[in-house]
């Protein structure tokens, strides 16, 4: 069974881990039951596995988060164990579900003639695209409009006054 060293940390009832298999990082994110506010770090966790294929997709686990050590069993020969670098107050039997994942890598596009690429890009633009809205910007715009409508200074009078002053400065009498 192959094994690698990695880092496992807890934060707010979740456990996160990072292990590098053949130069590719594998990320673990799992829920902890029962939920615990205790935080820990295990900077030299050992991941033991049968196949790298086990380290993708959903997972279930059970184990022990102790005062000094961490033991997680995922079944099928997949385990994580290590010494906790920040001691915990108490030992707890835990379990949960989560996922194993790898970073998303985009494939490089082959080099093409710039004119051909521009033409294909222009021709692939939809004729009636639906616009995406940023909800935060929309809310801020609504608040600004509401403020202007509710403000006690009449906006039209203010703009008219500014326009008249500007015209009197520019047009000689």
Image (tube, grey):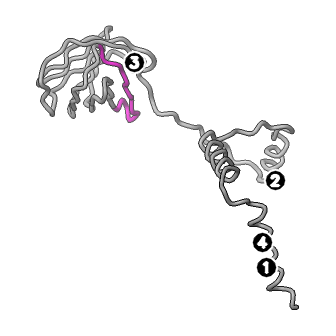
- Report the residue that reaches farthest toward the front: 152
Return the disc, 4 or 3, that comes first in the chain's sequence: 3
Please, what secondary structure does the residue beneath circle 3 have?
Answer: strand
Density class for disc 1 (Cα within 10 Å; few <14, some 14-19, many ≥20) is few
Identity of the residue drawn at 66% across and 44% down? 142
Instruction: Determine the CA span between mark 4 and mark 3.
Output: 64 Å
The dot on residue 115 is 2
Camera-side mark, 1 or 2: 1
| Image location of residue 162, percent across then percent down | 76, 73
Q: Where in the figure is residue 143, as x and y percent of width and height?
A: 63, 46
Which residue position is annotated with label 4? 161
Marked residue nearer the N-terminal end (3 or 2): 3
Using residue 23 as the reference point, say whether residue 107 is left or right of it. right
Return the residue at label 3.
98
Say above or below: 16 vs 123.
Answer: above
Q: Are marks 4 and 3 in contact (CB under 8 Å)?
A: no
């Amino acid at each position: 069974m192959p094994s690698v060293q990695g880092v496992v940390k807890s934060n707010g009832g979740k456990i996160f881990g990072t292990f590098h298999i053949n130069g590719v990082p594998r990320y673990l994110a799992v829920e902890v039951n029962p939920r615990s506010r205790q935080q820990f770090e295990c900077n030299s966790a050992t991941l033991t596995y049968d196949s790298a294929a086990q380290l993708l997709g959903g997972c279930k686990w059970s184990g022990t988060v102790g005062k000094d050590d961490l033991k997680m069993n995922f079944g099928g020969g997949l385990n994580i164990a290590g010494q906790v670098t920040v001691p915990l107050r108490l030992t707890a039997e835990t379990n949960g579900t989560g996922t194993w994942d790898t970073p998303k890598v985009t494939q490089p596009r082959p080099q093409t003639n710039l004119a051909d690429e521009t033409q294909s890009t222009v021709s692939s633009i939809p004729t009636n695209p639906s616009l995406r809205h940023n909800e935060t910007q929309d809310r801020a715009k609504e608040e600004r409009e509401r403020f202007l409508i509710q403000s006690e200074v009449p906006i039209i009078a203010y703009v008219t006054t500014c326009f008249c002053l500007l015209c009197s400065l520019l047009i000689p009498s």
